[in-house]
């Protein structure tokens, strides 16, 4: 899967609208591709700004704040039941945690 293919899927990925195979492919690519990783962060920020203004403060350190606010031991439920910000965090933990 190349970058172009991955990028077409990133939005669906954040919305938990990809199947497990796609999800694995996307995550494998994101792990190894800094460009797509950055794109995912940008997209996540945009999605969160659209869907939940209260959750997200403006500013470039939004993700840092999201991560900093998380309790360490929480077990994340299925992405399908999470808010967009929580889905991003859950995805991030699977990728880099
Ligand atoms: Zn890429």
Image (cartoon, helix red, strand yellow):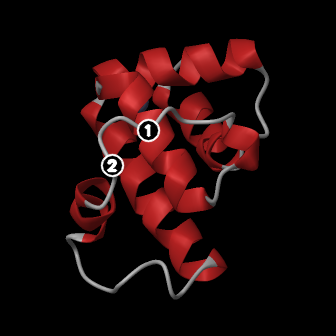
x then y, percent, for residue 27? 49, 22
Label 1 belongs to which residue?
74
Toward which corner of the image does residue 37 lie, by quadrant?
top left
Is 35 on the left or on the right of 29, as rendered? left
Q: Specify the quadrant that holds the N terminus.
A: top right
> Residue at left 29%, top 70%?
62
- Label 1: which secondary element: loop
Toward which corner of the image does residue 79 lie, by quadrant?
top right
> Residue at left 33%, top 86%?
58
x then y, percent, for residue 61? 20, 70
x then y, percent, for residue 68? 22, 58
Task: Classify 43 as above or below 36.
Answer: below
> Residue at left 56%, top 31%?
6
> Residue at left 59%, top 80%?
52
Do tag 1 and tag 2 residues touch (Cβ < 8 Å)?
Answer: yes
Is 12 on the left or on the right of 57, as rendered? right
Task: Classify 76 as above or below 11.
Answer: above
Task: Classify 33 as above or below 12.
Answer: above
Label 2 belongs to which residue?
71
- Label 2: which secondary element: loop
Q: Specify the quadrant that holds the C terminus.
A: top left
Which quadrant of the picture is home to ligand 1?
top left
Q: Is mark 1 within 8 Å of ligand 1?
A: no
């Amino acid at each position: 899967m190349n970058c172009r293919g991955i990028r077409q899927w990133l939005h669906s990925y954040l919305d938990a609208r990809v199947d497990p195979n796609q999800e694995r492919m996307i995550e494998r690519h994101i792990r190894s591709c800094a460009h797509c990783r950055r794109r995912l962060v940008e997209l996540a920020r945009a999605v969160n700004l659209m869907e939940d203004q209260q959750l997200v403060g403006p500013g470039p350190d939004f993700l840092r704040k999201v991560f900093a606010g998380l309790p360490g031991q929480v077990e994340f439920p299925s992405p399908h039941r999470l808010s967009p910000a929580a889905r991003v965090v859950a995805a991030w933990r699977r990728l880099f945690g």
